[in-house]
């Protein structure tokens, strides 16, 4: 029997043995899908954040509908979205350095408390009928400042809640599932509340819901930080983080694709009130259905990732997710009926969250621990930071050429990004395979003897990533 066949049989036995051990450990694929919840800290976070996120999605829908009711302007929808998200883009590199210098649990308690105050203020102004467009823009800007610190802090804190690094990918997928389950539930509830008693009650519920995640953070048992943080010049640390992102091809390429998808693909979100009111002839309930449909697709995406047993093969799905998002956006631009728009929104939600969650998982498993917060700040810049520019652009284009034509253009850019990433994949996988194998994140494989003449001059095997 040839050496290659022997090596294949050994690798297959190791894989089968590894899978059998994992199945005995978790009792089947369904239990395996929830494996990150065996960590007490993550379980607390999952429960508290799940409650809070329902309120967050209620506020997002209520804010968009309130702005639309006050202005009936696509441009103003873009301006409000821009004011709430541009801060994350501007402060992103600085936030990464700040987060690495702070106790992250205390930071998150502070940001969540500030976010509760913001929502309660918005509720008080709306319920007292003193709310103006200027108030909404100012409070959205304040929320953007909070998010600039909260998002890299939360993403880099995730690994502290999961002791076993092998469960990190599952924790990220479950976190995404939680976000998108709330995205499905929150807008549906908000649509009914806005239509019956007004937007202010959504803001009030959101403000109260933050206390659940604050309580979960306070109840956690977190071990002392083991990584030494440098206290050098901030700009030098920013430069070091940027050089790491710029020169590490997998992270650089993934962030570039995510930036395209956030800049162009996520712009559909700010235009949904236009589609609900003008294109489909509906109201707040229609907006809730559209947002909920996108949330349904996103939830399916997150659950499918939670069911995966390894990070192997994830990066291959990125260009598919981008193409699904782009194609669905193009078709949405030609749809003028609710029955067709709803399934398209499912595919839009699936494609965008699939790309975002995969990007998060892959980057978190590749990044060096001493640069995690800084790299995740660039991830948040690509994910949320590019979105305000896209929202502003989408609002302007929708004002000039209409919302349907705008999403067609956005979808075309997403498809183009998918094609570009396809050509990047071989170079990305060559680096990722080596990193994953060294970190033990892929099944063990029998190494080839370096002295075999028949392999002289050949590169080592590139594992599917």
Image (tube, rainbow, N blue to C red):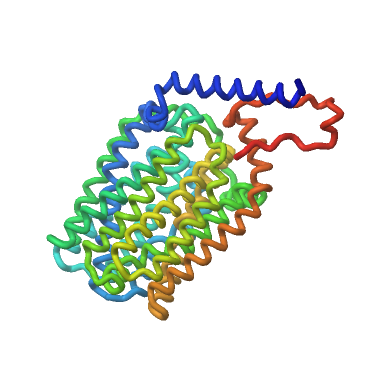
Q: Position of residue 239 (x, y in %)?
A: 62, 52
In the figure, is residue 92 to the left or right of 8? left
Specify the farthest residue to the right. Answer: 453
In the figure, is residue 249 to the left or right of 127? right
Image quadrant in which the N terminus is located: top right
- The answer to whether residue 454 shows anywhere in this view is yes
Q: Position of residue 414 (x, y in %)?
A: 51, 62
Seen at 17% across and 57% down, the residue is 193
Image quadrant in which the C terminus is located: top right
Q: What is the quadrant of residue 62 in the picture?
A: bottom left
In the figure, is residue 21 to the left or right of 342? right
Q: How many marks?
A: 0
Quick check: 421 above or below 362? below
Seen at 71% across and 25% down, the residue is 5
Looking at the picture, tell me which residue is in the foreground, 236 or 191: 191
- The answer to whether residue 116 shows anywhere in this view is no
Looking at the picture, tell me which residue is in the foreground, 186 or 283: 283
Seen at 35% across and 57% down, the residue is 343
Q: What is the quadrant of residue 352 in the picture?
A: bottom left
Quick check: 407 above or below 43? below
Specify the farthest residue to the bottom. Answer: 400
Seen at 24% across and 67% down, the residue is 66
Q: Position of residue 319 (x, y in %)?
A: 55, 53
Q: Position of residue 95 (x, y in %)?
A: 48, 51
């Amino acid at each position: 029997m040839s050496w290659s066949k022997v090596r294949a049989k050994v690798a297959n036995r190791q894989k089968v043995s590894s899978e059998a051990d994992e199945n005995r450990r978790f009792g089947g694929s369904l239990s395996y899908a929830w494996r990150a919840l065996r960590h007490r800290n993550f379980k607390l976070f999952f429960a508290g954040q799940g409650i809070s996120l329902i309120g967050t999605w209620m506020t997002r829908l209520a804010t968009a509908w309130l702005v639309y009711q006050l202005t009936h302007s696509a441009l103003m929808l873009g301006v409000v979205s821009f004011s709430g998200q541009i801060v994350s883009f501007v402060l992103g590199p600085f936030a990464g350095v700040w987060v690495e210098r702070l106790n992250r649990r205390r930071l998150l308690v502070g940001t969540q408390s500030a976010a509760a105050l913001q929502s309660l203020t918005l509720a008080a102004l709306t319920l007292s009928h003193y709310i103006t467009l200027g108030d909404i823009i100012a409070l959205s800007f304040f929320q953007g400042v909070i998010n600039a610190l909260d998002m890299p802090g939360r993403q880099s804190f995730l690994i502290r809640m999961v002791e076993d690094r092998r469960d990190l990918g599952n924790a990220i997928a479950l976190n995404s599932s939680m976000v998108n389950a709330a995205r499905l539930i929150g807008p549906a509830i908000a649509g009914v509340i806005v239509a019956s008693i007004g937007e202010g009650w959504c803001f009030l519920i959101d403000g109260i819901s933050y206390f659940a995640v604050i309580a979960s953070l306070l109840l956690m048992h977190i071990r002392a930080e083991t990584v030494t943080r440098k206290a050098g010049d901030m700009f030098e640390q920013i430069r070091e983080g940027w050089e790491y992102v710029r020169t590490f091809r997998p992270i650089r390429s993934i962030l570039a694709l995510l930036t395209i998808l956030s800049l162009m693909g996520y712009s559909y979100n700010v235009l949904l009130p236009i589609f609900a009111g003008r294109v489909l002839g509906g109201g707040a309930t229609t907006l809730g259905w559209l947002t909920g449909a996108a949330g349904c697709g996103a939830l399916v995406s997150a659950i499918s990732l939670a069911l995966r047993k390894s990070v192997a093969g994830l990066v291959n799905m990125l260009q598919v997710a981008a193409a699904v998002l782009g194609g669905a956006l193009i078709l949405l631009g030609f749809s003028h009926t609710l029955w067709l728009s709803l399934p398209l929104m499912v595919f839009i939600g699936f494609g965008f969250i699939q790309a975002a969650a995969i990007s998060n998982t892959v980057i978190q498993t590749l990044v060096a621990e001493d640069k995690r917060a800084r790299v995740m700040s660039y991830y948040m810049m690509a994910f949320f930071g590019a979105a305000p520019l896209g929202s502003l652009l989408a609002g302007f284009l929708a004002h000039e050429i209409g919302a349907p034509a705008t999403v067609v253009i956005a979808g075309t850019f997403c498809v183009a990004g998918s094609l570009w990433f396809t050509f990047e994949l071989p170079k990305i996988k060559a680096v990722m395979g080596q990193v994953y194998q060294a970190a033990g994140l892929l099944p063990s494989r029998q190494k080839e003897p370096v002295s075999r003449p028949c392999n002289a001059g050949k590169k080592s095997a590139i594992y599917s990533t």
